[in-house]
């Protein structure tokens, strides 16, 4: 099995690094269009409880109040919520707890950590590659019938495709755990979300609070699913995995006011995304993939490897596409930022294309 070196999170498989993420693109004063975390001042209703929690750090964390708040936000019983140190920890818990599965399937292109977590836990992974020709749309018929653990993202990183809820729900069946990574669901205004669905067998929804709320360094997310399944995942979770400040953030982000704020952010984001997509549409050879639905867009650019490096020389970091199964070097993922940043970026991109 491929291994990362000590202190190195790379995970090379067939020449592709599944451990590569956008943060590795950023640095040395580059404008960051590679990481899909929103950059904005923290609202007081979030900053204040996080700051206040620092007074309680001598006590071990108590997840009960935050769990109750998240359960109320999704109208689910508390035992159908498991708070995690970011969505990323959820993938590891699933991979570790479900060692008995025979045929885990990962639907690509998608975030690579589910596959990495499965492989680190010793699973043999079957990949389903959604074809470019279909706009990377989810076709449930492509998933083998005997798959007993399936990972799919919605909306999907890096394609920004939002699959119809019917297509995702069609993957659920008795004898299968269906994991839907909804880390970016709020960026699509919760459209096509399965977070509130309790009728689908084996459904686990993965959520993150690190993106919209700029909490990647705090590590907070959660799983929603059947109580018996979540109990198995909790059993392999490290004790006190979610810190007291992270729990304070989870409770604050579950309030009705926070959910309303998320919707507002999603609508501003949609306008900023339209601006980016329109500007990219005016560039020779650049094709925006489909109708992007999240806080990033995927573009196809001939000679993408050269273009990415030339953009770095001009001060812009974008996310390479060649570490995503099903894509290649001519694909670049670009975070949606405000119109001023977008305009600067698009003129830099134009320069690299004319060079
Ligand atoms: C699709 C997707 N899921 C999950 C994660 C992990 O999120 P978190 O920061 O909550 O661990 C990411 C982070 O980039 C992501 O892109």
Image (cartoon, helix red, strand yellow):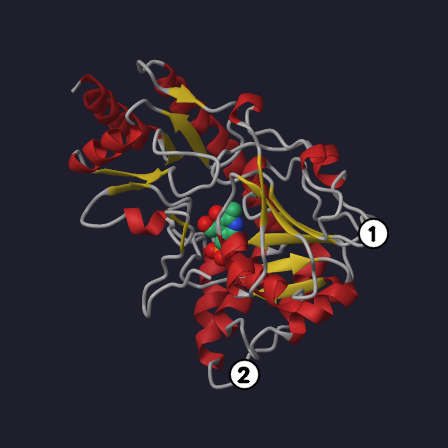
State the image coordinates of residue 202 (x, y, percent, origin top left): 77, 54
Q: Residue at x 71, y 65 (%)?
A: 230
Q: How far across and down, in percent of the image, does residue 233 sit?
A: 66, 68
x, y percentage for residue 66? 62, 67
Is residue 313 shown above or below 135?
Answer: below
- Residue that numbered label 2 is attached to: 60
Q: Disc number at residue 129?
A: none
Q: Nearer the viewer, residue 151 or 325?
A: 325
Outermost residue on the bottom side: it is: 58
Q: Earlier in the sequence, mark 2 or mark 1?
A: 2
Query: Which residue position is annotated with label 1?
Result: 174
Residue labelled 1 has its Cβ within 8 Å of some atom of ligand 1: no
Q: Is residue 192 above or below residue 84?
A: above
On screen, residue 229 versus residue 281, left or right, reads: right
Tell whether circle 2 marks a residue whose Cβ is less than 8 angstroms from ligand 1: no
300 displayed left or right of 167: left
Would residue 297 be seen by someone viewing this image from the given angle? yes
Label 2 and label 1: CA atoms lie apart by: 38 Å
Q: Residue at x 31, y 51 (%)?
A: 24
The residue at 54%/54% (across/down) is 114
Bin the neighbour count of mark 2 within 10 Å (Cα to Cα): few under 14, some 14-19, many 20 and up.
few
Q: Would you call the spot at circle 1 few (<14 residues within 10 Å), some (14-19), or many (20 or more)?
A: few
Q: Image quarter for residue 33?
A: top left
Local secondary structure at mark 2: loop
The relative height of residue 239 versus residue 342 in the rendered view (above or below) is below
């Amino acid at each position: 099995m491929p291994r990362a070196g000590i202190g190195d999170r790379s995970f090379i498989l067939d020449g592709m690094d599944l451990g590569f993420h956008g943060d590795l693109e950023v640095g040395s004063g580059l404008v960051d269009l590679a990481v899909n975390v929103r950059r904005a001042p923290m609202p007081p209703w979030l900053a204040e409880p996080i700051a206040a929690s620092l007074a309680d750090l001598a006590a071990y964390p108590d997840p009960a109040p935050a769990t109750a708040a998240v359960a109320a936000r999704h109208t689910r019983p508390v035992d159908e919520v498991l708070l995690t140190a970011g969505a990323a920890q959820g993938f590891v818990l699933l991979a570790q707890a479900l060692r008995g599965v025979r045929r885990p399937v990962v639907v690509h292109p998608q975030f690579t950590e589910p596959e990495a977590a499965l492989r680190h836990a010793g699973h043999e992974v079957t990949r389903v590659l959604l074809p470019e020709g279909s706009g990377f749309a989810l076709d449930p018929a492509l998933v083998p019938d005997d798959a007993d653990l399936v990972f799919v993202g919605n909306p999907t990183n890096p394609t920004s495709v939002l699959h119809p809820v019917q297509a995702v729900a069609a993957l659920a069946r008795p004898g299968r755990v269906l994991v839907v990574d909804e880390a970016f669901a709020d960026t699509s205004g919760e459209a096509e979300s399965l977070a509130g669905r309790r009728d689908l067998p084996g459904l686990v929804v993965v959520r993150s609070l690190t993106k919209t709320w700029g909490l990647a360094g705090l590590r907070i997310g959660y799983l929603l699913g059947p109580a018996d399944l979540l109990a198995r995942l909790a059993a392999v979770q490290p004790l006190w995995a979610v810190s007291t400040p992270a729990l304070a953030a989870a409770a604050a982000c579950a309030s009705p006011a926070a959910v309303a704020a998320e919707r507002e952010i999603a609508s501003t984001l949609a306008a900023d995304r339209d601006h980016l997509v329109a500007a990219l549409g005016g560039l020779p050879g650049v094709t925006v993939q489909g109708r992007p639905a999240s806080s990033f867009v995927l573009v196809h650019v001939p000679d993408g490897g050269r273009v990415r490096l030339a953009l770095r020389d001009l001060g812009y970091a974008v996310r390479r596409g060649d570490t995503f199964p099903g894509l290649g070097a001519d694909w670049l993922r670009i975070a949606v930022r405000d119109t001023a940043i977008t305009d600067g970026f698009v003129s830099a991109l134009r320069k690299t294309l004319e060079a």
